[in-house]
């Protein structure tokens, strides 16, 4: 194996591995994040870079051919289509009134201010929040 | 019908055909010439708008904007990966709104997609002049409201 082939192979494998890492991180985020909107963060961003890195790896491995030009176009379309579809899905969820999840910390003060030992209302149940946040939804 | 736009569209469509087909025998090139003609005739008024000014400057500025965008995408991925993989999962989602200074649809689309691709923020909706953005924590929301990206987009589309 000549030096050039080896460098090409090493670069390809490294880029593929980094791409796989980001895809994996995105998938783990998808499973772990608490609600619809934060899951959009995981899938909408990590897929763009993960796929991009993998496609760059394929271009390096394949060399300059017509195929690599096609792959470049693929990257451009993914770069355009991924945030657009993320936005479309998020907008659909927002339009039907899905409430974004809030962490306990951010509502702690409001909860403490209710004051009268009402420990059932932790501020994180759907019933407890529907009224107070409804002003944000159009 | 603007003959300049028709010819420009024809050249672009034909070049795209040749690149995708990658066969240069008589049949494939001939079919490309005919099909490109039909497609260019049907769509020549979609790609180029008569009203648009400074098209070349905008295109060049947009190409200059891309490296910064790619850098932001890398930052965004590291950010999400960190939040997804750390045991404490440091997220505090919130919806923030801000009023945009951008006028044209293209500029607003570019800003919306850039917001989605950059760390910690996803565009939900644009109502009139107001962007609704879901931020995964407080810091990305503050960075967005500071408005650096909007100024960059405004510069690219010459609206500053």
Image (cartoon, coloured by chain):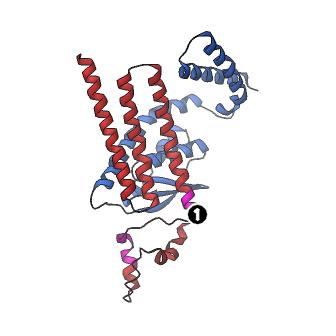
Chain colours: A red, B blue
- Residue situated furthest top in the rendering: B26
Residue B128 magenta = no
Task: Give the residue drawn at x 56%, y 43%.
Answer: B107
Task: Give the residue drawn at x 42%, y 53%.
Answer: A41
Residue B130 seen in the current view? no
Q: Is B103 displayed left or right of B3 in the figure?
A: left
Q: Which quarter of the picture shows residue B68?
A: top left
Residue B125 seen in the current view? yes
Q: Is residue B134 or residue B153 the one in the foreground?
A: B134
Kindly state the secondary structure of the residue where label 1 is placed: loop
Residue B76 position, x and y percent, is: 37, 47
Q: Is A39 displayed left or right of B50 in the figure?
A: left
Q: Is residue B141 or residue A93 the one in the foreground?
A: A93
Q: Is residue B32 or residue B2 the one in the foreground?
A: B32
Count of marks overlaid on the render: 1
Q: In the image, is residue B44 above or below residue A94?
A: above
Q: In the image, is residue A133 above or below residue A17?
A: below
Q: Is A124 displayed left or right of B111 in the figure?
A: left
- Residue situated furthest right in the rendering: B1
Query: What residue is disc 1 on?
Result: A96
Q: In the image, is residue A29 above or below residue B36?
A: below
Task: Give the residue drawn at x 53%, y 67%.
Answer: A136
């Amino acid at each position: 194996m000549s030096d050039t082939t080896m460098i090409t192979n090493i670069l390809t494998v490294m880029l593929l591995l980094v791409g796989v890492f980001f895809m994996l991180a995105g998938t783990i985020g998808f499973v772990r994040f608490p609600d619809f909107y934060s899951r959009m963060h995981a899938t909408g961003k990590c897929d763009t870079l993960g796929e991009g890195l993998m496609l760059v790896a394929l271009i390096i491995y394949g060399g300059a051919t017509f195929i690599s030009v096609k792959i470049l176009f693929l990257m451009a379309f993914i770069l355009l289509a991924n945030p657009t579809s993320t936005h479309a899905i998020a907008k659909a969820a927002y339009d039907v009134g899905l409430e974004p999840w809030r962490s306990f910390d951010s509502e702690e003060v409001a909860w403490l201010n209710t004051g009268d030992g009402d420990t059932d209302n932790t501020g994180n149940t759907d019933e407890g929040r529907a009224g107070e946040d409804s002003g944000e939804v159009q | 019908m603007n003959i300049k736009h028709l010819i420009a569209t024809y050249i672009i469509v034909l070049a795209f055909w040749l690149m995708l087909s990658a066969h240069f025998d008589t049949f494939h090139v001939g079919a490309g010439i005919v099909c490109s003609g039909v497609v260019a005739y049907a769509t020549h008024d979609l790609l180029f708008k008569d009203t648009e000014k400074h098209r070349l400057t905008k295109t060049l500025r947009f190409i200059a904007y891309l490296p910064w965008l790619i850098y932001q995408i890398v930052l965004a991925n590291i950010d999400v990966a960190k939040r997804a993989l750390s045991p404490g999962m440091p997220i505090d989602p919130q919806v923030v709104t801000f009023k945009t200074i951008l006028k044209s649809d293209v500029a607003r689309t570019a800003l919306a997609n850039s917001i989605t691709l950059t760390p910690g923020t996803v565009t939900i909706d644009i109502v009139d002049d107001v962007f609704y953005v879901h931020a995964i924590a407080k810091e990305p929301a503050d960075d967005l409201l500071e408005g650096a990206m909007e100024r960059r987009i405004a510069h690219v589309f010459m609206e500053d």
